[in-house]
Amino acid sequence: MTQTPETQSASLIKEFAPRRSFLADFQRWEWLLVLLIVVVIVANTRLSPHFLDARNISRTSSDFMELGLMMLPMAFIIITTASVDLSVASNLGMCASFMGWLFMHGVNIWVAALAALALGTLAGFLNGNLVARLKLSPLVVTLGTYAFYRGVAYVLLGDQAARGYPKAFTYIGQGRIPGTLIPFSVALFVVLAIIFGLILHRTIFGRYTFSIGNNENATLYSGVPVARVKIILFTVSGFMAALAGLVLAARFGSTRPDIGTGLELAVITAAVLGGVDINGGRGTIVGTVLSLLLIGLMRFGMGLLNIQGQVQGIVIGLLLILSILLPNIAQQISSARGVRINWRSALISLGILAVFVLFFLFFFWSRAPVIAGG
Amino acid sequence: MKHRSLLLALTTLLLVGLLVSACGSAATKAPAATEAPAATEAPATEAPAATEAPATACEGDYVLVPKNLGNPYFDTANNGAQEAAKELGITVLYQGSATADATEQITLLNSLIAQQPCGLAISANDADALVPTGQAAMDANIPVVTWDSAIAPDGRTIHINQAILHDIGAIQIQMASELAGPDGGQIAILSATSTAPNQNAWIEVMKEELEKPEYANLELVEVVYGDDDDTKSYNEAQALFTKYPDLKVIIAPTTVGIAASARAVTDAELIGKVFVTGLGTPNQMREYVKNGAAPQFALWNPSDLGYLAVYAMHALANGEITAEAGQTFEAGKLGEYTIEDDPDLGLNVLLGLPFVYNAENIDDFNW
Amino acid sequence: MTAQNPPALGTSPATRRNLLWTLVRFREAGISVFILILVVAITLRSPSFLTVDNFEDILLNISILTIVALAQAMVIITRGIDLSVSSMIGLVAMMVAFVVKEHPEMPVLFAVPLGMALGAVLGTFNGLIITFGKVPPIIATLGTLSIYRGLVFFYSQGTWINSFELPRSFKLLSKGTPLGLPNMVIIAIVVAVVVYYFLNYTRTGRDIFAVGSNPDAAQFAGIRKQRITFLVYLISGLLTGLAAVLWASRFESAQTNTGLGFELQTVAAAVIGGVSTSGGAGTVPGVLLGALLLGIIQNALPLVHISPFWQLAIQGVLILVAVVTDNLIVRRAQRTRK
């Protein structure tokens, strides 16, 4: 790869990723999230006396840190590739299982943890190379490694559980910063979030990621080593997944091969809800952190109200869709002002509406015996 | 520009409105078996006050936590729990995670602990991973009992044991031996997930049991895993017929696996040649008991299990017992129980002997 | 639509298309050879594998996968993805099973159009969000994946429909053999033939490829991109609804977790079968072979005494091998053309 002078590439990049001030970045979406968070806090405080309790919040907050750790690099990957890393939760499982496996075979826990971090980094590097060097779709590559890495976790531990980790290690997932109620994992996440935020919004590397996401070819021609950037991102994602694996294993005090199954969807949801554009090129770390906070508070609040898990799933799913759908629709309405109503499309809309109404009528009619019987 | 911000505000309002209404409508529906919402029940001041004075009656809610929601086995246990609640005059909530997953269950438990309930009765998704959470609950002076699937002894007080490992393992081998007939033959085990603690313990006992001389003519050819997934279990059962043409009995110590295996036997027209037995529920197995694919199977009564769990939890919360070996407590219609200490299981209470369902008695049960 | 990698530089969309076609053809040959080698290897270790009975089992096991994978393939060809299929199966299976249970007087055959209609409504919902709401497919269907699953639970309140509650005629819907083969296998074959005809010999079918290989060019050529995109999600719902009825009939039950995790299998079958996730390429025979390969592996691992713990890892490696070989062949082909 030929190196063009930094200045030249930087000026070209500016065209695609104009550097915005921090406050300018902190725009609509973030304020919306802040507003939602306030609403959730107010609503929950009114609905449950246990919501604003420092100990409760401290205990619950650590439930979302593995998710947060994986969300940070996921934001970078979505911004750059307009795609996702589906393999993070499997990678987490593989690394945690590898560490457990080594530990069960008598290896010192810290050595095992370092080895797990190395394995996760390597796994991310493999993803990155397949994506960047072979120019494969990240979705397909990581779908493959999603199955493969989880498979390795099962091969390593099978039906065994690794347990008996020393106290010093479980501190990572269970301990608190001495003298405070802040869990260690939360502190770890905050530090890393600041580092990731600075990298994304304050460094040339961060601008590369936006630039690639906005126009990959133009960025390539302006001398940015696009492939290398992508490999670095996936490698970092692998490292963070391994780190999340250590935190989760420490929080559990044990490892089974199914550890963290299904977390990848929660990670993607958190990133997208944080305003990271799934089409690439846009997003902020502040937004993702806010969205993690929102999801955490909502889930905790719904838990306090004893809302069942499946209903919580519906709410989070709706939130995910609406977070993209509503702004789009608003935009369409505002740009469509003055257009005459088209009878044909009106009829079609009515027809579709009728279909949904019929569906729900049927839905409630047919489940009536369930309610009566139950 | 102005329009845009207006629209944005509108969008926000819509979103918020939707959220609140979603929460509201869901909240009214959620606790199926209770009248009073949990949140308003316990006044905020009570939380710190409840720490000492265990001898006085606890005023809050009790919670029965299944491995996951949407499973008739746990729902049946909840029926028993509600029956006990009515007798004791307490409120028992039934709260579970959407999937049988330790991570989700821990999140749920943390929000339950935050509500300072009088007691938690948990069926654990992971014996080890739940230990820190169980300890956190006990640190907050919430008595933790487990039922169906235990947390390791450090993370709870007593475990309500549905049956002793040995009894369950032994009865399944005994049923298999009866089905295989005097000549014996090949048997296979179709288990749930390879990580389920109770499954693995039963399989160990079955293997020990097979060493006995009276079972010398039974040959265990393989243990396969259906992951408590209907499709996978069905496929695994099919693979067993193919691989072992002389197979006599499939033992499935899981409610999902036994029904899937019995159906696989029926579909493959192997009734009378291959028999299925193990642990199942009457409603699921009724058809196969009658068509001969699974003439007999065993299980405890999950309703009694939930019933006993609530009584144990109540006795602990009110200081009748303090979770020490040898203590006894009354459990309504089930009579008196004694806390026992077991080197593997820690403190536990044994529900009773497993019950064998067959064509003669199955119509007496409907769950 | 998502901003996917633009076509490789120096090749016009048309030549790229040709290359992809040769690749896809090669892929079918390649995967066939691979399946043959696999069959021989397994048979050597476990003779009971190569029996008519066992192959009938495999065909039964992959019928549902095939139907949904074909729908998934159509979606992927337009550069989309439908992750909600597994929850659609769960919801439709539950609703149909409830209706069948509560109304045993209803002719059983009615369950099929009912399931397809219910599936189509769910697919319409996906399609609307994606086309008119401009929500990227992966996000939209990720959202409906949890929404539809939540509805299953809301609908059933946690109860399951068990075998004994369903009429025998409903169970025979999928497993009866009036035509020699189980109905389900025949239905899967019919679906495959119809989809094959639709994709290759109808205007709309060709448009699906056009939209996938170059959405902008398709728009200029007068193809209504929105309408085609909407249509594939509708079809995905329709076929998934059919699969859901067969699922309930075959497994004689509907549970709150019916179909959980199935979406990744359908994507895997399509991708292994050569459907390109960058859009515009894929064939029906390829998808069938992909599903067959997955079915054989699932069936064979226990037969050759490979620990079930290896199954997932092997599937993952296969997907990776499939996409990497694809890519290498495309590159080779491009180089020789130049």
Image: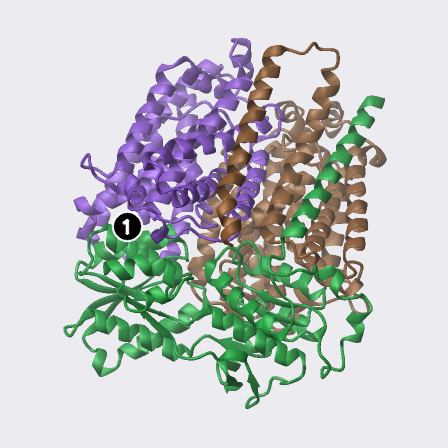
Chain colours: A brown, B green, C purple
Q: Is residue B156 left or right of residue B254?
A: right
Q: Which residue lies most toward the left here? A: B183
Quarter assignment of residue A246: bottom right
Residue A351: percent from left, percent from top: 55, 21
| Disc 1, SS | helix
Q: Residue at x 41, y 68 (%)?
A: B199
Comparing B281 with C106, the one in front is: C106
Quarter assignment of residue B84: bottom right
Comparing A208 with B117, the one in front is: B117
Q: Find disc 1 in the rendering and name its residue.
A: C300
Crowd class of label 1 (few under 14; some 14 to 19; many from 20; radius 10 Å):
many
Q: How many marks?
A: 1
Q: Residue at x 65, y 71 (%)?
A: B90
Q: Is residue C128 left or right of residue A171?
A: left
Would residue B238 be visible to someone looking at this image?
no
**From what the image shows, is residue B195 above or below residue C104?**
below
Q: Residue at x 50, y 79 (%)?
A: B333
Would residue B341 be visible to someone looking at this image?
yes
**From what the image shows, is residue C195 above or below residue B269?**
above
Residue A293: percent from left, percent from top: 74, 49
Comparing B1 with C323, the one in front is: B1
Residue B83: percent from left, percent from top: 55, 69
Q: Which residue lies most toward the bottom here? A: B326
**Amino acid type, label 1:** Ala
Residue B120: percent from left, percent from top: 62, 70
Position of the N terminus of chain C, as image quadrant, is: top right
Position of the C terminus of chain C, as image quadrant, is: top left
**From what the image shows, is residue C198 above or below residue A187?**
above
Q: Is residue B24 left or right of residue A268?
A: right
Chain where mark 1 sits: C
